[in-house]
Amino acid sequence: MAGDFDELLRKVRGHKPDVVISDIRMPPAHTDEGLRAARQIREELPGTGVLVLSQYLDEDYAFALLSDGTEGVGYMLKDRLTDGDRFVDAVRRVAAGESALDPEVVAHLLGRRRDRATPLDELTERERAVLAEMAEGRSNAAIAQRMYLSDRAVERHVTAIFAKLGLDATPQSHRRVLAVLAYLRA
């Protein structure tokens, strides 16, 4: 436990935990100290997962948190913490280097109005649903199970998503992360 931004960073550096759970707003100013700490922890200790909790959905905070990549990061709304299984699942996924985004955050980011056409407009409804599951940090196997599809069907949808978004396989990029970021930005 840490009482403020500086103490949190000091303890994380000293203990090097698998996961840090932090509120976005922390003393002393109660603004975005937790978010700033999360970004600094991810930069200094990339093997440490960070799950950020927030009372309110703020898309700017969500984008700032995800701007450095989605590996080992989570963003959950506090009112969802009553679902213990979901919270434990989020902590485990973040600790494993995956992402965990609150479905309400994903829905809000996806529900934003778009004034211009994007490559996402080319996706079918099923491909959008698969991409939404990817944005929540789920693997192909987990998506198949949740959507009652075969693993092969999910692979075909993911391949189609990459093609429609113009994401070629290169050693310098991670197509899955780029697809999710395109999805959240659209």
Image (cartoon, rainbow, N blue to C red):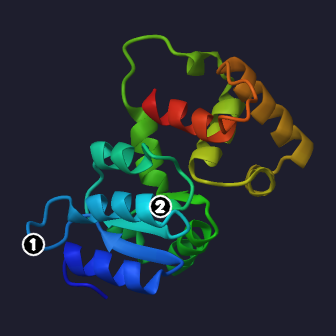
Check residue 28 in the rendering and tell me which mark sits there, or answer none: 1
Any part of residue 150 in sight: no
Pick the front one: 152 or 145: 152
Q: Amino acid at mark 1?
A: Pro
Residue position marked by numbered label 2 in the rendering: 74
Q: Amino acid at mark 2?
A: Gly
Pick the front one: 95 or 89: 95
Q: CA distance from mark 1 to mark 2?
A: 23 Å
- Image position of 161 (left or right of 178): right
- Which image quadrant is residue 14 in? bottom left
Give the x, y percent position of residue 98.
61, 60
- Image position of 21 (left or right of 178): left
Check residue 100 in the rendering and tell me which mark sits there, or answer none: none
Give the x, y percent position of residue 18.
54, 78
Question: In the image, is residue 60 above or below residue 165?
Answer: below
Local crowd size for mark 1, using a 10 Å CA cut-off: few (<14), some (14–19), many (≥20): few
